Image (cartoon, grey):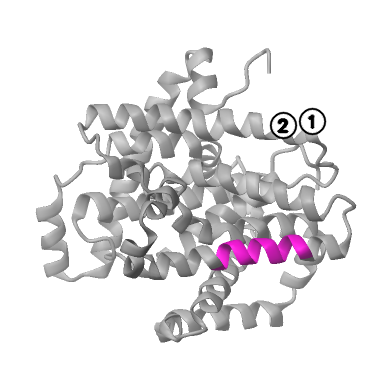
Amino acid sequence: MEQTKRIEYIDALRGFAMILVIYFHIPSYCLGNAYIGFNDILEWVRMPLFFFISGFVFYKADRIWTSETIKAVLKKKFMVQIIPMAIFMTLFLILFDCWELKSLGSDKKGYWYTFVLFEYFVLYIGAEALFNKQKTHQGEFLVFLSVLFISLVSFYYAKYYTRYEEELGIWKDILGFFSFVKIRHFIFFWFGTFVRKYYGRFVTLTDNAYFLIIVIVLYLMMTLFPMVYHTNGLEYFAYMATGFAITIIVFTFFRKNERLFTKDKWYGKSLQFIGRRTLDIYLIHYFFLPYHALQNFGVWLIQYDNILLEVFVIILLSLFIIGISLMASSIIRLSPFLAHYLFGAKTNKT
């Protein structure tokens, strides 16, 4: 696979993942119930898939982690991930008059994703530079163990930290600022880099019908019998297995049907455009969500109890919000200066 050429089905997949994110935010912020419209199931798809894609597109086979490379990559990622997030979050807090200490906590008023993704870059590069300079199987295994350990600790911290708030003291605020509870998704970022590295073998494996059947059955078992998530000792395994399984399923669907997501098809072109503007949409859409304005309608939806209607309404609102966000993005991008500093767009000098 060429490292510099855009892969159309990957852009389409990113667009699909972005729609899933907005699809979750509509019930959460607007309709007053986060888990209508199959959102309780889509919850297991959204973040694993998004971070998997981030890891997949980040990996470069020919990259050597020298001090100069590390500085250059982290500088670039800081400009793309942190600066725009800080600007938009500050504007959001000013416009919605919600300055408070907890705004800097783990959720960061919704702006945690790019912040945490930058942390993933730092952690992954650090692990690679520390354990895998020589690019050996042993070094790769040590990188995996370090990622697994960090993700596992974050997972159980997210599960139990409220029980020990007093004992944690100021550490709760420090870990909250660094969104430590969100680092549990780190394992899926690593999985993306792993699949990109062994892409040929992964394709061969997922082209095997029996393997895919096993993965699909595993995912269905995890979703149909969620009690495994609450069984001591199995929670993290269930979380990781479910994320890996659904990521493999969705990724393989887009890969095997990449002809359906080319630019010569309107929906393929649309998904690709959304996929190339995921950062823009993510940063902008919070300003256009009709917070609390639709809660009465949300109550009616729940009382009406029609899952298909819920899905239709949420998809319609999601696409509307995405459309407005893309319009705002296009206007902002008319200025190369704003496009560079707000969305990390390349300039003639970069």
**Are circles 2 and 1 on residues that touch, CB within 8 Å?**
yes
On the image, which quarter does residue 144 sit in? bottom right
Front-most of 263 and 102? 102
Residue 277 image offset from top left, x and y in percent: 51, 35
The question of residue 151 being in magenta is answered with: yes
Q: Identify the mark at residue 91; answer none if there is no mark.
A: none
Residue 260 image offset from top left, x and y in percent: 60, 53
Q: Secondary structure at mark 1?
A: helix
Q: Residues within 10 Å of mark 1 (few under 14, many from 20)?
A: few
Q: What is the tally of numbered marks visible in this picture?
A: 2
Of the 4 image quadrants, the one containing the C terminus is top right
Residue at numbered disc 1: 68
The question of residue 301 being in magenta is answered with: no
Residue at position x 39%, y 70% from top?
Answer: 160
Prevailing SS of the magenta stretch: helix
Residue 162 image offset from top left, x and y in percent: 33, 66
Residue at position x 41%, y 26% from top?
Answer: 87
Q: Is residue 105 left or right of residue 14?
A: left
**Residue 10 visible here:** no
Residue at numbered disc 2: 71
**Residue 136 visible here:** yes
Q: Is residue 99 left or right of residue 334?
A: left
Q: Amino acid at mark 2?
A: Lys
The residue segment tinted magenta is 142-152
Residue 192 image offset from top left, x and y in percent: 66, 56
Q: Amino acid at mark 1?
A: Glu
